Image (cartoon, rainbow, N blue to C red):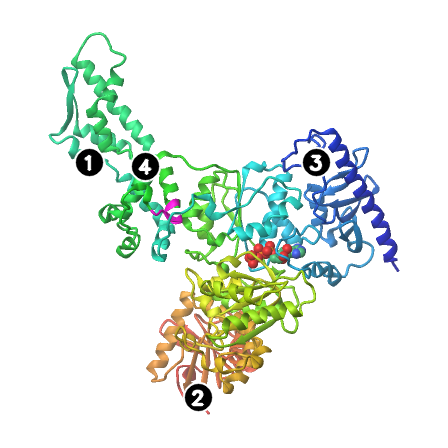
């Protein structure tokens, strides 16, 4: 039996020694080094012998533990102990006492699976409060490893209060996270993960890892986040990891401050990738062959030059113009055209005046007013601002550039009469991104370039912004973190390929996924899941490892007059009941109610106030307790209200309370309210809910469907409890119905049933076809493309059982409908006898299989 207290005491001695060495080093450095402090992010890399021993002059751990793990390894037949921590620490002889978690050696040992331990004989995670060792867990060692105990550290860590700033995860980083953190920087790595799966954490640790391992220098890296509050939230993580000098910026800060904003339809057009094609054509349309008539009316361009007439035929000008129709910045093409024209005119002038060559003739021709005019007409020297201003103001110019790219309606959407002066143009953020694109098209110039870019909440980048980022990063090395289901921006990507295609360079891109949820309690995640699926059917909700408990999720109906007061009262109530004063309580509210809620909070006053955050600003943040006010209003906010709502309800670590007077959006509880039912007019009370006394709904959870009436309550309770199951089923049915073969077969069968004068139901979210006929209720499950092996068909039978369950009643007849005869003929009898499911399939001239007559609407034998 291991004496755990003795082990902890021994580890404490090692940790104490590490701190002693750590602190001695500061003292020595303070004495030795000059007073100007280093800002090199490689501080601590003295572990690499040739690296300069630059370390900060004082402890910058901010109270975090210096040591996080111990590893014993057999090296040259001898066992050696290493400690892994947040910083490199050496003893007086310059021998490493603690190696940095970012070092390649630490990474290798930390990633080693217990069943392939190799030379690692012990891997021990240490649980320290600063310098005090509290506990330990052996992941590799002589004692059998209990996985559930290993989780304890993580769960304990997740339980800590969220006081408004993010912490690093060095102590509990998971294998799949460390693999992404230390992945090669080549190409674009896209990390898709649902709410709270650790994307931000992975992104920040990756920056630190890339810099520590000298893949890049501090100034090579650009880190972009969604908004200022988020940047404040993550502010401490990089310094605590020992990475200094990297300052994340808000996405919008990459451009100047906007002077105006556009209506949503205009934003959507200007932000889309097609706008790039329009801008490119707008630049190509400047001057050019169409303007030639103004210059060379009688077929020639000619003028009197110092007593002789020199000229160029129009055809020659045309061919010079055509030669410049190649890719490249407009001004470079302009210069090249000008050189050709001047060369030819100089030659003509020399021929007209034989004699001594005149070396300055080119310069005089170039400055000649006629040549200057020619250049200005054929190649007008316009600023990006002038090009965009005219494009937006003049419908003809826009049509010439956008024809076949933007619809008439889209062209009308971006029309904007020009301001009296250029300086007064109300450039919006989308305009500023277009201006950057135009600047690049015209001069080839762009903003500062980086060797690696990290983007958090990347799903909200617009395609035009993505192009701008790609230009800033010619190496094509990026870390892109996001969740398509949390899209709140003006552009919604169908999949990551669309965005990654815009960002990536020649090294391409790859998609990684984080699937474990570390923030949101299980019940809340399950409640949020259908909404996430409604925003992006392509992304899976995370599996939460955070157990919930009583009161984790509350849905409270109120009426419009009481809505704000009720929500605020509930937030204060949570504060009153929460024993830990560090735990954060936040009201997430629709834009329109923000001021009202803030005032109501101030009016109540007190020592501890809940935070009030408008839904769009909640992105990326996390709190312990969250009260979401009026989800329907959030869901209606532009540009992507459902995404905003999904973000809002997935911010909490402890509890979620929803206060609503309007019906809860049906995307959130799809089984309880059809779209038509939930569309109550703005301002009108939802009768059943408004009538309910707050005390009665106080204990409501998601299982007590707020929009259902009493008669439906039991059924709703039953179904809502199985919501994740139903949602998963609906999701996979939706996916199947995207298959053309599946739908072709389904609709041929529907046609047969209509021909038999029956009324089949085809719009159930779970059953492919349900039909009341002479043989009773018949349920059809259609298989699309793919194999028809027994294993596959047995799976389909299981689906039939699930569908019956979801539909709330068993069918009288069950049919599996295949595109072809099954691969093994015997399966037909087995499925019929074992599961009472008949199989039919399509043939060249109709249908075949078991009991086809019943399947096609006949009465059956009995
Ligand atoms: N291995 C881990 N150990 C401890 N805490 C972790 C771990 N991984 C993630 N967390 C914590 O989980 C929470 C959510 O992480 P993070 O904010 O990085 O998620 P996210 O995927 O960016 O979420 P969202 O998309 O909702 O913004 C944070 O508090 C983070 O510290």
Image quarter where ligand 1 lies: bottom right
Q: Residue at x 21, y 28 (%)?
A: 373
Q: Is residue 480 above or below residue 51?
A: below
- Spatial CA distance of label 4 from label 3 is 48 Å
- Residue 454 percent coordinates (x, y): 54, 46
Q: Looking at the image, do the residues carrying marks 2 and 1 touch, with CB atoms under 8 Å apart?
A: no
Residue in the picture at 43% in, 43% down: 256
Helix or strand or loop: what does disc 1 sit on? Answer: helix
Q: Which numbered circle lies on residue 55?
A: 3
Of the numbered discs in the image, which one, if any, rests on residue 291? 1
Residue 430 inside the magenta-drawn segment: yes
- Quadrant of the drawing holding the N terminus: bottom right
Q: Position of residue 65 (x, y in %)?
A: 74, 49
Q: Which residue is mark 2?
A: 775
Extent of the magenta region: 426-432
Q: Residues within 10 Å of mark 3 (few under 14, many from 20)?
A: many
Tell me the distance, in whole angstroms, between the alpha carbons under discs 3 and 2: 82 Å
Callout in the foreground (3, 1): 3
Q: Which mark is residue 383?
A: 4
């Amino acid at each position: 039996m291991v004496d755990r207290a003795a082990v902890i005491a021994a580890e404490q001695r090692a940790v104490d020694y590490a701190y002693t060495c750590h602190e001695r080093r500061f003292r020595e450095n303070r004495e030795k080094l000059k007073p100007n402090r280093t800002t090199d992010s490689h501080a601590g890399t003295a572990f690499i012998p040739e690296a300069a021993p630059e370390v900060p002059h004082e402890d910058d751990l901010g109270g975090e533990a210096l040591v996080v793990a111990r590893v014993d390894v057999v090296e040259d037949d001898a066992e050696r102990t290493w400690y892994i921590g947040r910083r490199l620490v050496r003893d007086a002889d310059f021998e490493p006492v603690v190696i940095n978690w970012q070092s390649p050696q630490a990474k290798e040992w930390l990633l080693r699976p217990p069943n392939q331990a190799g030379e690692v004989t012990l891997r021990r995670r240490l649980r320290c409060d600063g310098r005090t060792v509290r506990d330990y867990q052996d992941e590799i060692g002589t004692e059998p490893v209990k996985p559930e105990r290993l989780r304890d550290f993580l769960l304990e860590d997740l339980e800590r209060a969220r006081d408004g700033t993010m912490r690093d995860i060095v102590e509990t980083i998971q294998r799949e996270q460390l693999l992404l953190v230390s992945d090669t920087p080549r190409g674009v790595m896209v990390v898709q993960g649902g709410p709270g799966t650790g994307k931000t954490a992975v992104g920040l640790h990756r920056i630190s890892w890339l810099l520590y391992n000298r893949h890049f220098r501090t100034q090579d890296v650009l880190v972009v986040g969604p908004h200022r509050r988020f940047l404040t939230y993550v502010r401490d993580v990089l310094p605590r990891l020992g990475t200094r000098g990297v300052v994340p910026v808000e996405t919008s800060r990459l451009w100047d401050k906007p002077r105006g904003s556009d209506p949503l339809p205009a934003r959507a057009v200007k932000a889309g990738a097609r706008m790039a094609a329009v801008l490119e054509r707008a630049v190509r349309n400047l001057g050019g062959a169409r303007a030639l008539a103004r210059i060379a009316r009688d077929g020639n361009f000619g003028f009197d030059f110092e007593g002789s007439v020199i000229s160029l035929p129009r055809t020659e000008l045309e061919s010079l113009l055509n030669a410049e129709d190649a890719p490249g910045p407009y001004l470079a093409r302009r210069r090249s055209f000008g050189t050709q024209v001047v060369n030819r005119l100089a030659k003509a002038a020399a021929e007209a005046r034989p004699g001594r060559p005149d070396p300055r003739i080119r310069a005089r021709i170039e400055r000649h007013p006629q040549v200057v005019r020619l250049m200005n007409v054929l190649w007008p020297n316009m600023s990006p601002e002038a090009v965009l201003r005219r494009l937006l103001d003049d419908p003809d110019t826009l049509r010439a550039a956008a024809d076949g790219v933007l619809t008439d309606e889209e062209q009308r959407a971006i029309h904007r009469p020009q301001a009296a002066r250029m300086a007064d143009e109300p450039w919006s953020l989308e305009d500023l991104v277009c201006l950057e694109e135009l600047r690049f098209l015209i001069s080839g110039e762009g903003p500062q370039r980086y060797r690696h870019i990290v983007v958090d909440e990347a799903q909200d980048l617009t395609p035009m912004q993505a192009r701008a980022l790609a230009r800033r990063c010619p190496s094509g090395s990026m870390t892109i973190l996001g969740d398509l289901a949390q899209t709140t921006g003006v552009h919604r990507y169908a999949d990551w390929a669309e965005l990654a295609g815009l960002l990536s360079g020649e090294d391409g891109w790859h998609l990684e996924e984080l699937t474990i949820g570390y923030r949101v309690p299980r019940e809340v995640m399950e409640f949020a899941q259908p909404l996430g699926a409604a925003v992006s059917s392509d992304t899976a909700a995370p599996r939460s490892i955070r157990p919930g408990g009583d009161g984790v999720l509350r849905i409270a109906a109120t009426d419009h007059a009481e809505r704000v007061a009720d929500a605020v009262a509930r937030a204060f109530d949570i504060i009153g009941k929460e024993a830990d004063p560090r735990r954060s309580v936040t009201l997430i509210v629709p834009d329109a109610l923000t001021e009202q809620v803030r005032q109501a909070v101030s009016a109540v006053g007190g020592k501890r106030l809940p935070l009030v955050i408008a839904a769009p600003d909640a992105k990326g943040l996390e709190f312990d307790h969250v009260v979401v006010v009026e989800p329907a209003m959030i869901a209606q906010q532009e540009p992507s209200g459902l995404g905003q709502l999904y973000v809002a309800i997935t911010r909490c670590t402890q509890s979620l309370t929803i206060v609503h007077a309007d019906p809860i959006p049906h995307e959130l509880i799809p089984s309880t309210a059809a779209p038509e039912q939930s569309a109550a007019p703005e301002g009108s009370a939802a009768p059943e809910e408004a009538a309910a006394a707050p005390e009665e709904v106080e204990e409501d959870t998601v299982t007590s469907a707020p929009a259902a009436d009493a008669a439906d309550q039991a059924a709703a309770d039953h179904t809502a409890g199985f919501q994740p199951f139903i949602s998963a089923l609906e999701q996979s049915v939706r996916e199947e119905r995207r298959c053309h073969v599946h739908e072709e077969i389904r609709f041929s069968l529907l046609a047969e049933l209509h021909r038999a004068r029956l009324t089949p139901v085809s719009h159930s979210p779970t059953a492919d076809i349900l039909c009341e006929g002479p043989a009773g209720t018949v349920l059809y499950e259609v298989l699309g493309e793919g194999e028809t092996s027994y294993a596959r068909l047995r799976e389909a039978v299981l689906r039939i059982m699930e569908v019956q369950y979801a539909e709330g009643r068993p069918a009288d007849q069950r049919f599996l409908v295949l595109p072809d005869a099954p691969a093994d003929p015997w399966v037909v009898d087995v499925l019929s006898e074992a599961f009472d499911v008949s199989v039919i399939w399509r043939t060249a001239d109709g249908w075949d299989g078991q009991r086809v007559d019943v399947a096609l609407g006949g009465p059956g034998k009995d």
